[in-house]
Amino acid sequence: MATRSGASVRVLNMTASPGAAARRIDAGGFVQDAYFVNGTDKALLAAVVDDAVVVVDLADDVPPRSLPVQAHGSRVCAGTVDGADVLGWTHSGLAHIWDVHAAAPYRPSFPLTGWAREMAFANLGDRDLVLAMHKATVRAYNPQTGRLVTELPFGTTINAFSVLPGTTEDHLVLAIGGPGVMVTELWNR
């Protein structure tokens, strides 16, 4: 579990013995958000610190690594594209995808249709997707080409969304929050 407090992030191992101390990581600036990078072979944490993206290797006692990008007001997400561990965020109308281990762009940034507040990675069967949350619509993009794949209009303001694996590899569950909560399913058929 990770919590943020001013210029630091505290990481607590939930499987450790009761009373185990949390690790405090000095991020070197104001921490806007912090996320675990799932699917990697390392324990990594990504954070937006003073409008930049910072990656912390939790297994090694090394200083946080700052990526040379701007992420003002962005929420960072983590996932995989073609089996590579990536970070993604939206900024200035573009979707940015960076390779976690190389600390370099995975592919060139691509424009999103309309202003997106947040994005997420999803794997639907053999298809990798970037999902972008807009005011009342979730749009799915192909991360390799940047092309719009489909739109899911909800007809109400979306304040938050989450993508979960479904019951099979060809199935995803998308939960959105706005004035209420809505759950829908995506199938690869």
Image (tube, rainbow, N blue to C red):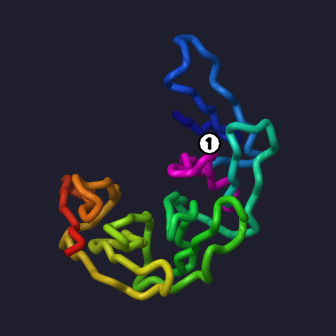
Residue ID at (27%, 72%):
136
Q: Is residue 178 left or right of residue 140?
A: left
Does the image show residue 112? yes
In which image quadrant can residue 87 be found? bottom right
Residue ID at (24%, 75%):
152
Q: Residues within 10 Å of mark 1 (few under 14, many from 20)?
A: some
Q: Nearer the viewer, residue 129 or 2?
A: 129
Q: Which residue is mark 1?
A: 43
Q: Is residue 116 left or right of residue 189?
A: right
**Vertical comparison of 60 with 71: above or below:** above
In which image quadrant can residue 2 be found? top right
Q: Is residue 94 left or right of residue 102?
A: left
Could you tell me the amino acid type at mark 1?
Answer: Ala
Q: Position of residue 85 (x, y in %)?
A: 57, 60
Q: Report the span colored magenta.
A: 32-52
Residue 137 among magenta residues: no
**Vertical comparison of 72 with 50: above or below:** below
